[in-house]
Amino acid sequence: QVQLVESGGGSVQAGGSLRLSCAASGDTYRINYMAWFRQPPGKEREGVAAIYSDGGGGSPYYADSVKGRFTISQENDKNTAYLQMNILKPEDTAMYYCAAKMVVTSSFRLSRADDYDYWGQGTQVTVSS
């Protein structure tokens, strides 16, 4: 079992920055990927960024809409993942969720929400124009 707790959300004006944190506890040694998803009001959950937990596994994944503005990172000794969000836009307004993937198979897709095993409760990000 893994527990994920997000923090760092809030309200910010367009052009501003926020840093989200995701603290993992429990069987964290079994986590292979950490990811951030978001769900705007009335829309489906979408993948924002993902990273391989051991630091290898290639470059992090980013959705096209956030490339160059968002950065995913992690501190393995603290079992914490981060999402640094810069140059925020009103369309970034959403509930942001942290997710963890345990066993990876060939069908795993970094941006597919259904492929992840554990989820946090979410943290709200609101960007005003």
Image: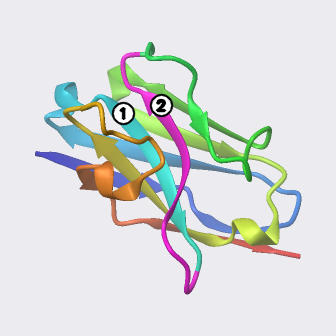
* Type of amino acid under label 1: Tyr
Q: Which is nearer the eye, 121 or 39?
A: 39
Q: Which residue is mark 2?
A: 51
User: Residue farthest to the bottom?
Assistant: 42
Quarter location, residue 57: top left
Q: Is residue 67 left or right of residue 1?
A: right
Residue behind mark 1: 33
The residues tagged by marks 1 and 2 sit, at their Cα atoms, a distance apart of 6 Å
Taking 47 as reference, is 10 left or right?
Answer: right
**Residue 46 falls within the magenta-colored stretch:** yes
Residue 106 x/y as whole percent: 29, 31
Q: Position of residue 49 (x, y in %)?
A: 56, 43
Residue shown at 28%/40% (left/top)?
A: 101
The span picked out in magenta is 41-54
- Up-down relation of residue 14 to residue 64 (above or below): below
For disc 1, the neighbor class at 10 Å (few under 14, some 14 to 19, many from 20) is many
The quarter of the picture where the N terminus appears is top left
Which of pointers 1 and 2 lies earlier in the amino acid sequence? 1
Helix, strand, or loop for circle 2?
strand
Q: Quadrant of residue 88?
A: bottom right
Residue contact between numbered discs 1 and 2, judged by CB atoms under 8 Å:
yes
As for residue 82 lying within the magenta part, the answer is: no
Report the amino acid beneath label 2: Ile
